[in-house]
Image (cartoon, coloured by chain):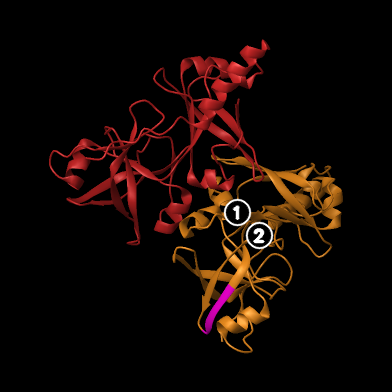
Chain colours: A red, B orange
Amino acid sequence: MSQAISPPPHRAVIEHLVRQSVYAKLGKPLPHTAGAPNPLVVNVSARHCHLTQEAVEILFGKGHQLQVHKWLYQEGQFAAKESVTLVGPRSRVISNLRILGPCRTLNQVELAYTDGIALGYDLPLRSSGDIKGTIGGMLMGPAGFFEMEQGIIRALRHVHMSPTDAEYYGVKPGDWMKLKIGGPCGLTLDRMLCRVDKSFKLEVHIDTDEGNACNLHPDTSCELFK
Amino acid sequence: MSQAISPPPHRAVIEHLVRQSVYAKLGKPLPHTAGAPNPLVVNVSARHCHLTQEAVEILFGKGHQLQVHKWLYQEGQFAAKESVTLVGPRSRVISNLRILGPCRTLNQVELAYTDGIALGYDLPLRSSGDIKGTIGGMLMGPAGFFEMEQGIIRALRHVHMSPTDAEYYGVKPGDWMKLKIGGPCGLTLDRMLCRVDKSFKLEVHIDTDEGNACNLHPDTSCELFK
């Protein structure tokens, strides 16, 4: 049986630790960014879905449990070994749509606009979980089909943070922040939703359109501000 | 024989004219943006290629001339009826890669990073025409194959402008400008290359990754500044 992958720490996490330790050794005050309580991790979410246990069993068979392929940065969240095929309105498909675990209480597919155009969807832009009245589609797994009546969205870009981070950045849940991404095709995302919970690690989630627009790599500079 | 399409004027062009006429009727001074010498048109360039006449003849047959499918905003430029298939390094293909005319003195394919990832290319980011040392690929047409030794790039986002526009915005050729794009997933492109020529109409070209990152539509507000 193959083992789940624990990815190495994100470069931003290591840089943050090194910076703090270097300034401490030099006996110098920390510059603003190095003084943040937590490193800023920016990750690109490729298209994926969240499913209920019921949907997983319809797609993969009675009693099936999602298996961990790779642990994600948020505690307890994982990319599953299982993936499904999404059939769009013009019978075009996206295969290998990754499932993220653990199971949730609703079914939701998160696509980039580029994916939506390829499939023939006019995707609604929604905050994760806010799927009322959104479009639906058909998922296909090895054990069967599962029809989603709604839940296909482009997820609003957002930042996960703890109350400590929110205090440091001077924001509250539901506020909008900006993220400036550097490099030769840099850009600033002007509307980034703040999601605050004490279980959250500081992490920005953008989609592949956003990540590719600025060619985001692990060593690209990122600055989060109000 | 089917005729070439002359697309209706871009919404930004009409809005600019209406704004100027309304302010003139009201006898009020023009606000800054309405006072610009020319409307700001922002267009998304989907993946495409520019070819030499020699390449066109290898791909489509001796003596073949590109036919106009649709006139573009820049004077004399057009999307051709002809398209080619691009074969990438892992034998993955992009079919229906549109040719833009008229023919040029070099062969160049412009892709978004999302296209590059799908094909297996690590695309260099280059200004159009600056293709020395870039990667190559194989083009396939109805009459034959044409191997490009180089010329496959992601084009640097840029703005075409006349010297009158450059004076208004206070920039010179090769300067960098910013473009703020509004809406619910708005962003600001922080590095946009200025290309100035007296034949140019004021127009920003971004690619599909950039256009989809912010869901750019004809009625999305755009602001160009230094």
Look at mark 2 in the image and give the residue it sits on.
B10
| In contact (CB < 8 Å): disc 2 and disc 1 | yes
Q: To which quarter of the image does residue A72 belong?
A: top left
Residue B38 at what x, y percent from top left? 78, 55
Provide the chain ID for the residue under circle 1.
Answer: B
| Residue at 53% in and 32% down | A192
Magenta residue check for B145: yes
Q: Is residue A127 above or below residue A116?
A: above
Q: Quadrant of the C terminus of chain B?
A: top right
Segment tinted magenta in the rendering: B143-147
The answer, for residue A25, to whether it is visible in the render is yes
Q: To which quarter of the image does residue A177 belong?
A: top right
The amino acid type, in three-letter code, at marker 1 is Pro
The answer, for residue A170, to whether it is visible in the render is no
Q: Is residue A184 above or below residue A219?
A: below
Q: Is residue B133 above or below residue A198?
A: below
**In this view of the protein, which residue sits in the foreground, B71 or B7?**
B71
Between the C-alphas of marks 2 and 1, the distance is 8 Å
Q: Earlier in the sequence, mark 2 or mark 1?
A: 2
**In this view of the protein, which residue sits in the foreground, B104 or A2?**
A2
Q: Are the residues under badges 2 and 1 in a single subunit?
A: yes
Look at mark 1 in the image and give the residue it sits on.
B218
| Residue at 58% in and 16% down | A21
Element on which disc 1 rests? loop
